[in-house]
Image (spheres, rainbow, N blue to C red):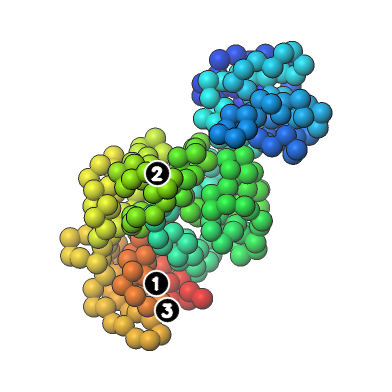
Amino acid sequence: MGVSLSQIAGLTPGVVAVIGGDVLVSDITHDSRQAGEGCLFVAIPGERYDGHDFVDAAIEHGSSALLVEQRQGDSLPQIVVESSRDAMPWAARAVFGIPDASMAIAGVTGTNGKTTVTHMIEAIMVSAGIPVGIIGTLGARINGVPLMIARTTPEATDLQRILAKMRDDGVHTVLMEVSSHAIELRRSDAIRFSVVGFTNLSQDHLDFHGDMEAYFEVKRRLFASSVTEAAVINTGDPWGERLEATSNVPTTRVSLDDEADIRATDLMASPLGTSFTASTPEGSVRVVLPLVGAFNVSNALVAIGMSLALGVEMPFISRGLGELD
Protein backbone atom coordinates (compact mmCIF):
# COMPACT_ATOMS: atom_id res chain seq x y z
CA MET A 1 0.00 0.00 0.00
CA GLY A 2 1.12 3.54 -0.65
CA VAL A 3 0.73 6.70 -2.69
CA SER A 4 2.56 7.24 -5.95
CA LEU A 5 5.22 9.93 -6.14
CA SER A 6 3.31 11.59 -8.98
CA GLN A 7 0.18 11.80 -6.82
CA ILE A 8 2.19 13.40 -4.02
CA ALA A 9 3.70 15.90 -6.46
CA GLY A 10 0.23 16.75 -7.75
CA LEU A 11 -0.92 17.67 -4.23
CA THR A 12 2.22 19.60 -3.27
CA PRO A 13 2.75 23.33 -4.03
CA GLY A 14 5.93 24.74 -5.53
CA VAL A 15 6.98 21.64 -7.49
CA VAL A 16 9.75 22.40 -9.97
CA ALA A 17 10.36 18.89 -11.32
CA VAL A 18 9.61 15.21 -10.73
CA ILE A 19 12.59 13.01 -11.57
CA GLY A 20 12.84 9.23 -11.84
CA GLY A 21 10.33 6.41 -11.54
CA ASP A 22 6.83 6.71 -10.10
CA VAL A 23 7.48 4.74 -6.91
CA LEU A 24 4.99 4.06 -4.13
CA VAL A 25 5.49 5.96 -0.87
CA SER A 26 3.99 4.86 2.47
CA ASP A 27 5.83 7.12 4.94
CA ILE A 28 7.61 10.48 5.11
CA THR A 29 10.30 11.96 7.35
CA HIS A 30 12.74 14.87 7.56
CA ASP A 31 15.05 12.82 9.84
CA SER A 32 17.45 10.63 7.84
CA ARG A 33 17.73 8.25 10.82
CA GLN A 34 14.04 7.43 10.48
CA ALA A 35 14.17 6.82 6.73
CA GLY A 36 13.42 3.33 5.46
CA GLU A 37 11.81 1.34 2.69
CA GLY A 38 8.80 3.15 1.22
CA CYS A 39 9.81 6.43 2.87
CA LEU A 40 9.99 9.87 1.26
CA PHE A 41 12.91 11.79 2.79
CA VAL A 42 12.47 15.57 2.96
CA ALA A 43 15.68 17.63 2.94
CA ILE A 44 15.10 20.91 4.78
CA PRO A 45 17.73 23.67 4.96
CA GLY A 46 18.01 24.90 8.56
CA GLU A 47 19.95 27.44 10.60
CA ARG A 48 22.42 24.83 11.87
CA TYR A 49 22.11 21.93 9.45
CA ASP A 50 21.04 21.43 5.85
CA GLY A 51 18.97 18.32 5.25
CA HIS A 52 20.54 17.98 1.80
CA ASP A 53 23.77 16.99 3.59
CA PHE A 54 21.94 13.93 4.96
CA VAL A 55 20.53 12.62 1.68
CA ASP A 56 23.22 9.91 1.46
CA ALA A 57 22.38 8.79 5.00
CA ALA A 58 18.69 8.61 4.11
CA ILE A 59 19.54 6.50 1.06
CA GLU A 60 21.68 4.20 3.21
CA HIS A 61 18.72 3.74 5.55
CA GLY A 62 16.60 2.60 2.60
CA SER A 63 14.65 5.72 1.63
CA SER A 64 12.64 5.17 -1.56
CA ALA A 65 12.35 8.79 -2.76
CA LEU A 66 13.43 12.35 -1.99
CA LEU A 67 11.80 15.76 -1.69
CA VAL A 68 14.54 18.34 -2.19
CA GLU A 69 15.32 21.89 -3.26
CA GLN A 70 18.36 20.88 -5.35
CA ARG A 71 18.46 17.83 -7.58
CA GLN A 72 20.36 14.97 -5.95
CA GLY A 73 21.85 13.06 -8.90
CA ASP A 74 19.88 10.14 -10.33
CA SER A 75 20.15 7.58 -7.54
CA LEU A 76 16.53 7.92 -6.34
CA PRO A 77 13.23 9.25 -7.68
CA GLN A 78 12.73 12.76 -6.36
CA ILE A 79 10.46 15.76 -6.25
CA VAL A 80 12.31 19.06 -6.61
CA VAL A 81 10.50 22.01 -5.01
CA GLU A 82 11.03 25.72 -4.44
CA SER A 83 10.86 25.32 -0.65
CA SER A 84 10.97 21.95 1.07
CA ARG A 85 9.78 23.51 4.36
CA ASP A 86 6.66 24.86 2.63
CA ALA A 87 6.10 21.67 0.62
CA MET A 88 6.55 19.16 3.45
CA PRO A 89 3.12 19.57 5.15
CA TRP A 90 1.32 19.08 1.85
CA ALA A 91 3.43 16.10 0.86
CA ALA A 92 2.81 14.54 4.28
CA ARG A 93 -0.92 15.15 3.92
CA ALA A 94 -0.84 13.32 0.58
CA VAL A 95 1.24 10.41 1.92
CA PHE A 96 -1.22 9.81 4.75
CA GLY A 97 -4.34 10.06 2.61
CA ILE A 98 -5.56 13.58 3.44
CA PRO A 99 -6.66 12.88 7.04
CA ASP A 100 -8.39 16.24 7.54
CA ALA A 101 -10.92 15.38 4.81
CA SER A 102 -12.37 12.62 7.02
CA MET A 103 -12.63 14.43 10.37
CA ALA A 104 -13.68 17.74 11.85
CA ILE A 105 -10.56 19.53 13.08
CA ALA A 106 -10.76 22.38 15.58
CA GLY A 107 -7.71 24.52 16.33
CA VAL A 108 -7.20 26.73 19.38
CA THR A 109 -4.58 29.47 19.46
CA GLY A 110 -3.62 32.23 21.89
CA THR A 111 -0.93 32.93 24.47
CA ASN A 112 -2.85 31.39 27.37
CA GLY A 113 -5.81 29.05 27.65
CA LYS A 114 -5.20 26.72 24.69
CA THR A 115 -4.84 23.62 26.85
CA THR A 116 -7.85 24.53 28.99
CA VAL A 117 -10.11 25.18 26.01
CA THR A 118 -9.19 21.94 24.24
CA HIS A 119 -9.73 20.04 27.51
CA MET A 120 -13.15 21.69 27.86
CA ILE A 121 -14.19 20.78 24.33
CA GLU A 122 -12.92 17.23 24.85
CA ALA A 123 -15.22 16.91 27.88
CA ILE A 124 -18.11 18.27 25.82
CA MET A 125 -17.45 15.75 23.02
CA VAL A 126 -17.31 12.89 25.54
CA SER A 127 -20.63 14.10 26.96
CA ALA A 128 -22.13 14.02 23.46
CA GLY A 129 -20.70 10.56 22.71
CA ILE A 130 -18.46 11.85 19.91
CA PRO A 131 -15.13 10.00 19.35
CA VAL A 132 -12.45 12.63 19.96
CA GLY A 133 -8.72 13.07 19.54
CA ILE A 134 -6.60 15.80 21.10
CA ILE A 135 -3.13 17.15 20.27
CA GLY A 136 -1.43 19.67 22.54
CA THR A 137 0.86 20.59 25.41
CA LEU A 138 -0.19 17.61 27.52
CA GLY A 139 0.36 15.22 24.62
CA ALA A 140 -1.93 13.48 22.17
CA ARG A 141 -4.71 11.08 23.03
CA ILE A 142 -7.52 9.22 21.33
CA ASN A 143 -10.67 8.83 23.42
CA GLY A 144 -8.54 9.40 26.51
CA VAL A 145 -5.76 6.95 25.58
CA PRO A 146 -2.36 8.77 25.41
CA LEU A 147 -0.03 8.85 22.42
CA MET A 148 3.60 10.00 22.55
CA ILE A 149 4.44 13.34 20.89
CA ALA A 150 7.35 15.77 21.23
CA ARG A 151 5.86 19.29 20.80
CA THR A 152 2.69 21.29 21.45
CA THR A 153 2.16 21.09 17.71
CA PRO A 154 4.32 18.27 16.27
CA GLU A 155 6.39 18.65 13.09
CA ALA A 156 4.23 18.47 9.96
CA THR A 157 5.22 14.89 9.14
CA ASP A 158 4.47 13.69 12.67
CA LEU A 159 1.26 15.71 12.83
CA GLN A 160 -0.17 14.19 9.65
CA ARG A 161 0.84 10.71 10.88
CA ILE A 162 -1.03 11.29 14.16
CA LEU A 163 -4.07 12.62 12.30
CA ALA A 164 -4.05 9.52 10.07
CA LYS A 165 -3.98 7.25 13.13
CA MET A 166 -6.87 9.16 14.65
CA ARG A 167 -8.85 8.80 11.42
CA ASP A 168 -8.07 5.07 11.23
CA ASP A 169 -9.15 4.64 14.87
CA GLY A 170 -12.56 6.16 14.16
CA VAL A 171 -12.08 9.65 15.60
CA HIS A 172 -14.79 12.09 14.52
CA THR A 173 -13.39 15.36 15.90
CA VAL A 174 -9.77 16.40 16.52
CA LEU A 175 -8.89 19.23 18.91
CA MET A 176 -5.52 20.89 18.35
CA GLU A 177 -3.53 23.49 20.20
CA VAL A 178 -1.90 25.58 17.47
CA SER A 179 1.11 27.53 18.72
CA SER A 180 2.55 30.59 16.99
CA HIS A 181 5.78 28.63 16.46
CA ALA A 182 3.81 25.95 14.60
CA ILE A 183 2.14 28.53 12.37
CA GLU A 184 5.41 30.34 11.61
CA LEU A 185 7.28 27.09 10.93
CA ARG A 186 4.48 25.76 8.69
CA ARG A 187 3.76 22.74 10.89
CA SER A 188 0.01 23.31 10.77
CA ASP A 189 -0.09 24.08 7.06
CA ALA A 190 -2.10 21.68 4.88
CA ILE A 191 -4.84 21.27 7.49
CA ARG A 192 -8.33 22.48 6.70
CA PHE A 193 -9.91 23.46 10.00
CA SER A 194 -13.64 23.29 10.63
CA VAL A 195 -13.27 26.04 13.23
CA VAL A 196 -10.44 27.90 14.95
CA GLY A 197 -10.63 29.67 18.30
CA PHE A 198 -8.66 32.59 19.76
CA THR A 199 -8.24 33.05 23.52
CA ASN A 200 -5.94 36.05 24.08
CA LEU A 201 -2.56 37.55 23.25
CA SER A 202 0.04 38.79 25.74
CA GLN A 203 3.77 39.46 25.77
CA ASP A 204 5.28 36.03 25.38
CA HIS A 205 7.42 34.32 22.75
CA LEU A 206 8.80 37.73 21.72
CA ASP A 207 12.27 36.20 21.65
CA PHE A 208 10.97 34.28 18.62
CA HIS A 209 8.62 36.81 17.01
CA GLY A 210 10.40 40.08 17.85
CA ASP A 211 7.42 42.24 18.80
CA MET A 212 3.68 42.08 19.41
CA GLU A 213 2.77 43.17 15.89
CA ALA A 214 4.75 40.31 14.36
CA TYR A 215 3.28 37.92 16.96
CA PHE A 216 -0.24 39.06 16.07
CA GLU A 217 0.34 38.75 12.33
CA VAL A 218 1.42 35.12 12.77
CA LYS A 219 -1.74 34.31 14.75
CA ARG A 220 -3.88 36.11 12.16
CA ARG A 221 -2.83 33.65 9.44
CA LEU A 222 -5.00 31.00 11.06
CA PHE A 223 -8.15 33.10 10.61
CA ALA A 224 -8.30 33.09 6.81
CA SER A 225 -10.85 31.49 4.51
CA SER A 226 -8.12 29.34 2.97
CA VAL A 227 -7.43 27.80 6.40
CA THR A 228 -10.73 27.53 8.29
CA GLU A 229 -14.46 27.46 7.72
CA ALA A 230 -15.33 29.44 10.86
CA ALA A 231 -13.80 31.30 13.80
CA VAL A 232 -14.59 31.91 17.46
CA ILE A 233 -12.78 34.92 18.92
CA ASN A 234 -12.58 36.27 22.46
CA THR A 235 -13.25 39.92 21.71
CA GLY A 236 -12.88 40.74 25.39
CA ASP A 237 -9.15 40.71 24.64
CA PRO A 238 -7.98 43.85 22.76
CA TRP A 239 -6.05 41.74 20.24
CA GLY A 240 -9.11 39.56 19.78
CA GLU A 241 -11.21 42.62 18.99
CA ARG A 242 -8.66 43.60 16.36
CA LEU A 243 -8.53 40.05 15.01
CA GLU A 244 -12.31 39.90 14.64
CA ALA A 245 -12.22 43.09 12.58
CA THR A 246 -9.83 41.50 10.07
CA SER A 247 -11.24 37.95 9.96
CA ASN A 248 -12.70 36.99 6.57
CA VAL A 249 -14.58 33.89 7.75
CA PRO A 250 -17.90 33.57 9.61
CA THR A 251 -16.94 34.66 13.13
CA THR A 252 -18.58 34.23 16.51
CA ARG A 253 -17.61 36.82 19.12
CA VAL A 254 -17.41 35.68 22.73
CA SER A 255 -16.86 37.91 25.74
CA LEU A 256 -17.96 38.73 29.25
CA ASP A 257 -19.53 41.95 27.94
CA ASP A 258 -22.99 42.46 26.46
CA GLU A 259 -21.88 43.09 22.88
CA ALA A 260 -20.74 39.56 22.06
CA ASP A 261 -22.63 36.80 20.25
CA ILE A 262 -21.92 34.45 23.16
CA ARG A 263 -21.62 36.00 26.61
CA ALA A 264 -21.76 35.10 30.28
CA THR A 265 -24.27 36.68 32.67
CA ASP A 266 -25.32 36.12 36.27
CA LEU A 267 -21.87 34.98 37.38
CA MET A 268 -21.64 33.38 40.81
CA ALA A 269 -18.27 32.40 42.26
CA SER A 270 -17.44 29.98 45.05
CA PRO A 271 -14.26 28.25 46.25
CA LEU A 272 -15.36 25.20 44.23
CA GLY A 273 -15.96 26.93 40.91
CA THR A 274 -18.04 29.40 38.95
CA SER A 275 -21.58 29.25 37.63
CA PHE A 276 -22.98 31.49 34.92
CA THR A 277 -25.63 31.72 32.25
CA ALA A 278 -24.25 31.29 28.75
CA SER A 279 -26.31 33.32 26.29
CA THR A 280 -25.84 32.12 22.70
CA PRO A 281 -27.58 32.37 19.32
CA GLU A 282 -28.86 28.82 20.07
CA GLY A 283 -30.42 29.84 23.37
CA SER A 284 -29.30 30.19 26.98
CA VAL A 285 -28.12 27.54 29.41
CA ARG A 286 -26.84 27.53 32.97
CA VAL A 287 -23.25 26.32 33.28
CA VAL A 288 -21.71 25.11 36.54
CA LEU A 289 -17.97 25.24 35.91
CA PRO A 290 -15.71 23.45 38.42
CA LEU A 291 -13.00 26.07 37.82
CA VAL A 292 -12.46 29.48 39.40
CA GLY A 293 -11.59 32.82 37.81
CA ALA A 294 -13.09 35.07 35.15
CA PHE A 295 -10.38 33.94 32.73
CA ASN A 296 -11.78 30.40 32.88
CA VAL A 297 -15.25 31.73 32.13
CA SER A 298 -13.73 33.38 29.03
CA ASN A 299 -12.09 30.07 28.12
CA ALA A 300 -15.44 28.32 28.56
CA LEU A 301 -17.13 30.81 26.23
CA VAL A 302 -14.56 30.01 23.53
CA ALA A 303 -15.18 26.29 24.10
CA ILE A 304 -18.95 26.82 23.89
CA GLY A 305 -18.66 28.77 20.64
CA MET A 306 -16.39 26.19 19.06
CA SER A 307 -18.60 23.30 20.19
CA LEU A 308 -21.66 24.96 18.66
CA ALA A 309 -19.71 25.45 15.42
CA LEU A 310 -18.96 21.72 15.51
CA GLY A 311 -22.66 20.92 15.76
CA VAL A 312 -22.92 19.97 19.44
CA GLU A 313 -26.23 20.76 21.15
CA MET A 314 -26.44 22.97 24.23
CA PRO A 315 -27.43 20.29 26.80
CA PHE A 316 -24.28 18.30 26.01
CA ILE A 317 -22.17 21.47 26.25
CA SER A 318 -23.54 22.34 29.69
CA ARG A 319 -23.14 18.77 30.95
CA GLY A 320 -19.63 18.39 29.56
CA LEU A 321 -18.39 21.60 31.18
CA GLY A 322 -19.95 20.57 34.48
CA GLU A 323 -18.15 17.22 34.39
CA LEU A 324 -14.64 18.61 33.88
CA ASP A 325 -12.08 16.83 36.03
Q: Earlier in the sequence, mark 1 or mark 2?
A: 2
Q: Which residue is mark 1?
A: 318
Residue at (49%, 44%) from the top-left corner?
182
As rendered, which of 17 and 45 lies closer to the eye?
45
Relative image position of residue 281 (x, y in whole percent): 26, 60
Residue at the spot of label 3: 290
* Dot 3: element: loop
Residue 263 x, y percent position in the rendering = 25, 65
The residue under label 2 is 209
Q: Is residue 325 left or right of residue 318?
A: right
Three-letter amino acid code of the residue under disc 1: Ser
Q: Is residue 8 visible?
A: yes
Specify whether residue 250 is in view. no
Q: Name the one closer to the observer, 264 or 153.
A: 153
Q: Quadrant of residue 257?
A: bottom left
Instruction: Give the mark toward the camera: 3 or 1.
Output: 3
Disc 1 to disc 2: CB gap under 8 Å: no
**Contact, CB < 8 Å: mark 2 with mark 3?**
no
Q: Around disc 2, counting alpha carbons within 10 Å, would you say few (fewer than 14), some (14 to 19), or many (20 or more)?
A: some
